[in-house]
Image (tube, rainbow, N blue to C red):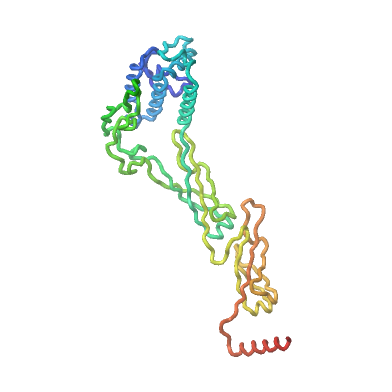
Amino acid sequence: MARPLATMAEQNQKDYYEILGVSCDADPEILKKAYRKLAKKYHPDRQPEDARAEESFKELQEAYYVLKDPIKRGRYDADFLGKSRGGKGGSRPAGSNDGGKGAGVSEVVEDIFEFLKSRMEDRGKRGEDLRYMVSLSFEEAALGIEKVIRIPKRKNCPSCAGRGWKTPGGSRACKVCRGEGEITATKRGKKQVLECPGCGGKGILEKQECAKCKGKGKVPYRVQRKITVPAGVDNGSRLKVRGEGGAGERGGENGDLYIVIQVKDHPVFTRRNLDVCCDVSVHFTQAVLGAKIKVPTLEGLKPLKIPAGTQPGAVFTLKGCGIPGLDGTRRGDQQICVRVEVPRRVSKKEKELLKAWQGMQQGLT
């Protein structure tokens, strides 16, 4: 009689015969019947409330996968049973070639591949990476900010426990495999056990998809997180938050969250590497006579001296008033381009003064 399958996961070496509840000299037909009987009992869809049903079902699949193949079974008998039972394991089936020692190179490579594949599957699946767009003002991107965001994620649908369909108890058995999940087919005179094409190996047919998740098994939700945006990020910059992506499956690690920065256009400032650029308008008399004005910066208004005789398009630099580097080693400057304003309309007295000034300039020449 098979022992409780739940305890098998605690062993480092597994007794596949004990898992299936058969003797070491059981023939393929006995193995198959034992597997089908236990598979029906421990199928996760038949026991949705049993947290360890899936683990037990995997052990059954693993044991049957090894013992149904004569070569794999021969190797298993020679290795595990020979060690654990002092060489008194059951007789090996015909065709095992004394533990598979005469097996070809291709069979050895196939076994290694299957072993590595099963190890990767047992290790669990890593969660998906998520991408989230964050829109910032020019000042927020330049100087840094803390923001609270609501990250969209997905979780197993609570109505169907992630299956995508309604409770399996109300589902009908597959007519192709009669609820066993696999079929026996004859190919080139040899019988092969294949996954049932009618139900995909589930043994049951979905009666009706879950109304809450529309058959997807996952539902969206949002989780609130506070993030720190460092000073100096630019349009298209990506911030990585480890472990805040999709949840892993079967014990796999969570994915990561990638926050993509979008910087809004500013009505005054533009960015050139770490420098901030802007245009400042001055009256033509200020350009001619010189003046002290205040110009906008990332940190408010700051004074700027306009020398007498300043020409249109002249550029002045305010050191250290630009954007901080992400590495914190330096900060850019602010480049200010002067635009000289010419009045569109002048008064009669202003015209007289300008004409007199023009006459003085012509007399000097």
Question: In the image shown, does 169 or 236 lie closer to the viewer?
Answer: 236
User: Could you say where residue 350 lies in the image, as x and y percent from the top left?
Assistant: 61, 87
As drawn, 350 above or below 24: below
User: Could you say where residue 187 lies in the image, as x and y percent from the top left?
Assistant: 34, 24
The quarter of the picture where the N terminus appears is top left
Q: Quadrant of residue 309?
A: bottom right
Q: Residue at point 72% right, 89% down?
A: 363
The residue at the far right in this view is: 364
Question: In the image shown, does 315 or 191 lie closer to the viewer?
Answer: 191
User: Could you say where residue 79 lies in the image, as x and y percent from the top left?
Assistant: 49, 15
Q: Left or right: 316 with respect to 181?
A: right
User: Could you say where residue 119 lies in the image, as x and y percent from the top left?
Assistant: 48, 28
Q: Quadrant of residue 153?
A: top left
As drawn, 27 above or below 269: above
Question: In the image shown, does 363 or 329 lie closer to the viewer?
Answer: 363
Q: Left or right: 147 with respect to 360?
A: left
Q: Left or right: 65 with respect to 284?
A: left
Q: Residue at point 65% right, 89% down?
A: 355
The quarter of the picture where the C terminus appears is bottom right
Total marks in image: 0
As drawn, 146 above or below 124: below
Question: In the image shown, does 125 or 162 lie closer to the viewer?
Answer: 125
The residue at the far front in this view is: 188
Q: Residue at point 46% right, 12% down?
A: 98
Q: Quadrant of residue 322?
A: bottom right
